[in-house]
């Protein structure tokens, strides 16, 4: 490794007029530098490196010693030595410019090695702390009386509270989400739910059929199910709710979802869970992965066909799916053409016979 501080020796490469920095103090040539963190260089060091290249890529030691420290260049010179862009020539004591591509590859390799070490250490943390975690969980604690209904105001505060409950979930999370969620909300849900699933928890989610018209919902549901979660569709009205470990429920406390009630009363939570289980049993299973390759319009058309088979009218289907009657009418018209039905009644009869699954 090159010494970080130059030692003056006879030089033959660059005239003294070349703007080359010199450190404020000199140390013996055999001094071993203390390990320092390598990193990018500042603007002054970049300018100095370019000057060295213009001078032929070599700096003579006597030219370095002749420069005045007041120019501010010694700091830039030290930066180049620190990063390895300049190295000392052991033959004559001069300094040589190093190919930045080689320096970048070297620094990148060092940083990758350090990052790998930190990742390995992070993965071992939980295992290393397992004995302490087990000891903490085994300590009996007095049950403190809790407020059955805690109001949380503000969407950001609500999200933080839900994230906190999700991070401590150990067995099961229930999610009932009527309506059509925004894509940004789904991204946030994924970031919170995937770690819960990796811990071995069960997550069950209910949506309404209108979710089939939103590609982001289909991608979200496919990702969650691949990770072990379950997502079903229920074409009925149900209450928006989140339940964690069947002990804590979060319900909306305002129509605009700006307030939420965090409920831990056992009887109330048990009733919410019972309602969810009842809805879950009636909900429809969906192969979300197969929908990834189909456009949302086709998914909506399939759902309309199923509702026609159940005898629902055009208006009722529009209400169930959250679509306009005109949109539903367009899908029905295409279904009639596809299956050769002259009337809506005939189309519904064909759907009941299972033609829509062909």
Image (cartoon, helix red, strand yellow):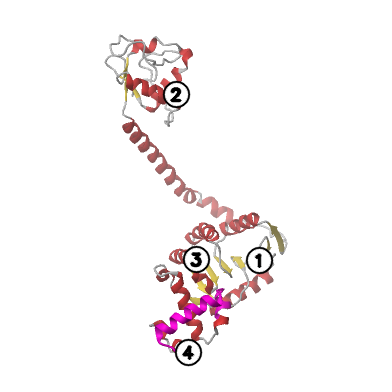
Q: Earlier in the sequence, mark 3 or mark 1?
A: 3
**Whether residue 182 is situated above or below residue 209 in the rendered picture:** above
Name the N-terminal-most of marks 4 and 2. 2
* Measured Cα–Cα span from mark 3 to mark 4: 33 Å
Q: Name the residue nearer the viewer: 220 or 136.
A: 220
Task: Work out whether mark 2 precedes mark 3 in sequence or the reverse, and give the earlier one.
Answer: 2
Element on which disc 1 rests: strand
Nearest-to-viewer mark from 4 and 2 = 4
Which mark lies nearer to you, 1 or 2? Answer: 2
> Alpha carbon of mark 3 to alpha carbon of mark 1: how far?
21 Å
Name the chief secondary structure element in magenta: helix
Q: Quadrant of residue 78?
A: top left
| Label at residue 217 | 3
Q: Sequence-wise, which precedes: disc 3 or disc 4?
A: 3
Residue 210: % across, % down: 53, 72
The residue at which mark 1 appears reads as 251
Label 4: state its secondary structure. loop
Residue lying at 47% horizontally and 17% vertically, measured from the top left: 72
Expressed as whole percent of the image width and height from the top left, the position of residue 299 reads 45, 73
According to the picture, the residue beneath numbered tag 4 turns out to be 343
SS for tag 2? Answer: helix
Residue located 65% across and 55% down the image: 157
User: In what quadrant of the picture does the N terminus appear?
Assistant: top left
* Closer to the camera in the image, 297 or 292: 297
Distance from label 4 to label 2 (Cα)? Answer: 81 Å
Q: Earlier in the sequence, mark 1 or mark 2?
A: 2
Q: Position of residue 344 (x, y in %)?
A: 49, 88
- Residue segment shown in magenta: 317-346
Residue 254 lies, in percent from the top left, at 70, 64
Residues tagged 4 and 1 counted as in contact (Cβ below 8 A): no
Callout 3: helix, strand or loop? helix
């Amino acid at each position: 490794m090159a010494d970080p501080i130059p030692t003056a020796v006879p030089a033959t490469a660059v005239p003294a007029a070349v703007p080359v920095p010199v450190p404020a103090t000199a140390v013996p040539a055999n001094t071993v530098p203390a390990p320092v963190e390598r990193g990018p260089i500042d603007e002054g060091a970049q300018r100095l490196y370019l000057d060295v290249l213009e001078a032929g890529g070599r700096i003579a030691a006597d030219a370095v010693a002749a420069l005045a420290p007041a120019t501010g260049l010694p700091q830039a010179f030290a930066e180049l030595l620190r990063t390895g862009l300049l190295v000392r020539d052991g033959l004559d004591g001069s300094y040589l410019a190093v190919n930045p591509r080689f320096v970048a590859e070297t620094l990148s390799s060092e940083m990758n090695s350090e990052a790998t070490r930190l990742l390995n250490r992070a993965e071992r943390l939980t295992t290393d702390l397992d004995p302490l975690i087990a000891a903490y969980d085994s300590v009996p604690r007095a049950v403190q009386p809790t407020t059955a209904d805690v109001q949380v105001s503000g969407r950001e505060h609500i999200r933080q509270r839900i994230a906190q409950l999700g991070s401590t979930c150990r067995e099961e999370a229930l999610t009932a989400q009527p309506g059509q969620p925004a894509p940004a909300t789904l991204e946030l849900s994924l970031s919170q739910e995937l770690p819960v699933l990796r811990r071995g928890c069960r997550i069950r989610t209910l949506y309404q059929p209108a979710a089939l018209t939103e590609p982001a919902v289909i991608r979200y549901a496919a990702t969650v199910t691949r990770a072990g979660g379950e997502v079903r569709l229920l074409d009925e009205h149900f209450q928006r709710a989140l339940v964690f470990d069947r002990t804590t429920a979060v319900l909306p406390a305002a129509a605009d979802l700006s307030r939420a009630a965090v409920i831990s009363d056992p009887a109330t939570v048990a009733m919410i869970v019972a309602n969810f289980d009842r809805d879950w049993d009636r909900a429809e299973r969906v192969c979300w992965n197969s929908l990834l390759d189909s456009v949302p319009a086709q998914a909506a058309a399939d759902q309309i066909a199923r509702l026609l088979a159940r005898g629902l009218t055009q208006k009722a289907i529009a209400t169930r799916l959250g679509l306009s009657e005109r949109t539903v009418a367009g899908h029905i018209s295409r279904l009639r053409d596809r299956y050769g039905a002259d009337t809506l009644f005939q189309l519904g009869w064909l759907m009941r016979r299972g033609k829509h699954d062909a």
